[in-house]
Image (spheres, grey):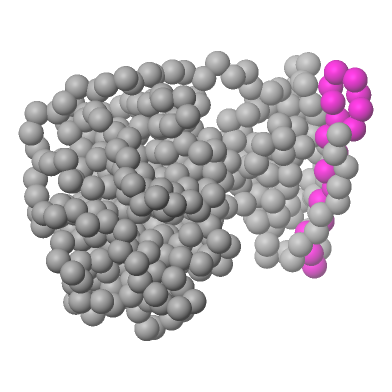
Amino acid sequence: MKRIFYFFIFYFLVFFGIDSFAQSIEITKSSDQKISISIQDFVIDSSEESITFFKVLKNDLERSGYFKITNISPSFSLKGSVKTSKKIFSKIYIVNGNNGKSIFNRSFDSDKSNYRYLAHKIADEIIFAITKKRGMSSAKLALVGNISGHKELYICDIDGANLRRVTNDKNIIVAPEWTPDGNNIIYTSYKMGYPNIYQIGRSKPLSDYGGLNVSASVSPDNKYIALILSKDGNPELYLKEIKTNKLRRLTATRRANEASPCWSPDGKKIAYVSDSSGRPHVYILDLRDGKPKRISSFGSENVSPSWGPNGLIAFSSRQAGKYKIVVSDLNKGINKVISLDNADYEDPCWAPDGRHLIVSRSINYRSSIYLLDTLEERSIPLINSKGDWYSPSCTR
């Protein structure tokens, strides 16, 4: 979806020339061993909420990629219980299978209606207790769905559950982005006939300058918005201070176009797309000196960067006629191309665990949202609803 929107921004320029050969690409497979864990000693009452709670918890642990659930000589045993009355209660114990010592012992409770969220929260607690790594189970997704002929904004859990529509613009919506605190979403809508930037729950646009107002991304400290404006001619990258509305132009590329800004985790740099070299590539602009640096040098088109909490940048690269996901480690100078099947993989967005990407997968003119494990290089579908789905954004 971002690729389609990119073409709109770039005045329908077409880049269908012969793909250039990939340069300095290292393709690796993860050799990480999964951690064996047993979950058989878990007491569940007969309520629908408790049964579903346990299924969600089990699925979250498996989906994380870190665990192999087995009863044969497990490294860890997950014990505990869940019961539902007016509220849902759960006790969780984790025992080290090597020495029999407990490493985790906590009780949880929540409103009965929040049993799925409680399971997600506990899954993340378990993942951190064993691996010391952040989980993703509690994260939320924003995404664009086209069910009835209009592209509207939806939100759901990261496993695709609790899908619900949050706009009724009856027009085109693109580029949703969660605010850093995960409490709101900014997005571009054409509901007034031209692209402006909006925020959920606010009728007045956040940005409605003349021309394009697209691809907004809020800084990690929630003080600035990086966005693309064409008020002075061609689409350029700007920085807007939220408190004062002060605007600062960051690029000035004559006869070129910018798109898709995203922030580094420390808020000191912005990755974005520019066709200043003749084809769209990914650049990084250091806000301290204002100097852009190109980081992609392969494929015929490189778009939609996402800067993860791990410091890695993922983007979509057109190679041999297909869009593939590239994960770039700037510190090591390694670019990992993830080739899965004959589909196009676009719009990558990092999950908060820094291991998984949420992507749009398109094949036979249909698009849906998938979860991509960048270590195991496998993907699973997240949205089972009818229609086409694009432009995922994940809470940080």
Residue in the image at 69% along x and 51% along y: 121
Q: Vertically, is 114 above or below 379?
A: below
The answer to if 88 sits in the magenta stretch is yes
Residue in the image at 47% along x and 29% along y: 331
Which quarter of the figure has residue 167? bottom left
Q: Is residue 104 left or right of residue 136?
A: right
Res 390 visible: no
Stretch in magenta: 86-102
- What secondary structure is the stretch in magenta mostly built from? strand
> Which x, y percent locates residue 206?
38, 76
Q: Vertically, is 184 above or below 270?
A: below
Q: In the depicted view, which residue is nearer to us: 80 or 167?
A: 167
Which quarter of the figure has residue 295? top left
Residue in the image at 59% along x and 35% along y: 64
Q: Looking at this rendering, what residue extends furthest in the front direction?
A: 289
> Which x, y percent locates residue 124?
68, 44
